[in-house]
Image (spheres, rainbow, N blue to C red):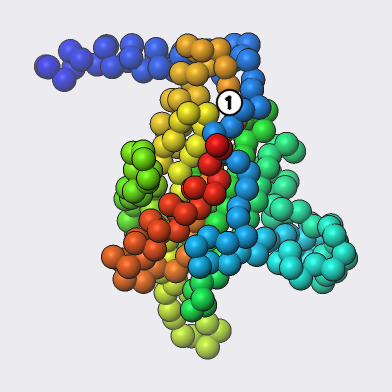
Amino acid sequence: METRSFRPYITVVALLALTSLALAFTVDTNISDEAGVRVYLPDQVGDWKGDELRFCQNPACQATVFLSEIKEKGVCPKCGGKLSTMAKAETDLLPSDTEVLKKQYTSPDGEIVFASIVMSGRERSSIHRPQVCLVGQGNEIVKSKVLDVPMNNRRPLDVMVLDMLRRWRAPDGRQGEYPSYYAYWFVGKGRETPYHTMRMVYMATDRILHNRSHRWAYISVSGVRDDEGIYRQKIASFVKQLYLEMAIE
């Protein structure tokens, strides 16, 4: 009886939430080019050296090449096709004013970490929930946890860390597993969150209460997952140094 008595109120709250979101994304809003972080990935993060990635837009090639390998600017060294900072599928899907930057970082002992930043354009539809694409690419998310990254002279940065597993089978029947991690967070003007839902709430709040819409960035770091304590320490160390380089002074 008590549960049923609350149903009308739950329905009203849900309708109010949907109405607020509808108003937030349909009313005239002051769209700003301001962002909370730079679209920038440094050439070096601590001892890690970075090399920017480019992606061939030729459907028959779609090669991934390092910027250091390119002899002719904007031209794929493998097929002569046009190069972009986005993969072909991303170019086809995302609004044209989306900014994307990706780098591969290598440590002195040969370990590799990938970092990327996606900055939304005026349509604000460039960023989506990461889990959808990751699972669609054949990954199994086995665990998720928010990691507190200590920062100097401010509160810790909350970063979502997904423990993933990709299973593979070779033509000869051999099977194996590839454990990896994917760490990410979202940054707006004066806002930071590891939750996609919270980012949507911030966007709605800014639109409804302040009649403004700032650009949001989606930053990610990924690599091989080994011992839990060690790789989480590596994430925290790398992210802290990367954050300091990307922050707007």
What residue lies at 51% left-to-right and 12% top-to-bottom? Answer: 210
Residue 185 lies left or right of residue 27; in this view the side is left
Question: Can you identify the residue that label 1 sits on?
Answer: 214
Give the quarter of the figure containing the N terminus: top left
The quarter of the displayed image where residue 137 is located:
bottom right
Residue 92, visible in the rendered structure: yes
Residue 165, visible in the rendered structure: no
Residue 181 picture location, percent across and down:
42, 61
Please name whichever residue, 245 or 79, is drawn nearer the observer in this view of the structure: 245
The crowd level at tag 1 (other Cα within 10 Å; few <14, some 14-19, many 20+) is many
Residue 14 lies left or right of residue 130; in this view the side is left
Residue 152 picture location, percent across and down:
37, 45
Is 128 above or below relative to 122?
A: below
Give the quarter of the figure containing the C terminus: top right
Is 222 above or below relative to 170?
A: above
Please, what is the three-letter code of the amino acid marked with disc 1? His
SS type, badge 1? loop
The quarter of the displayed image where residue 102 is located:
bottom right
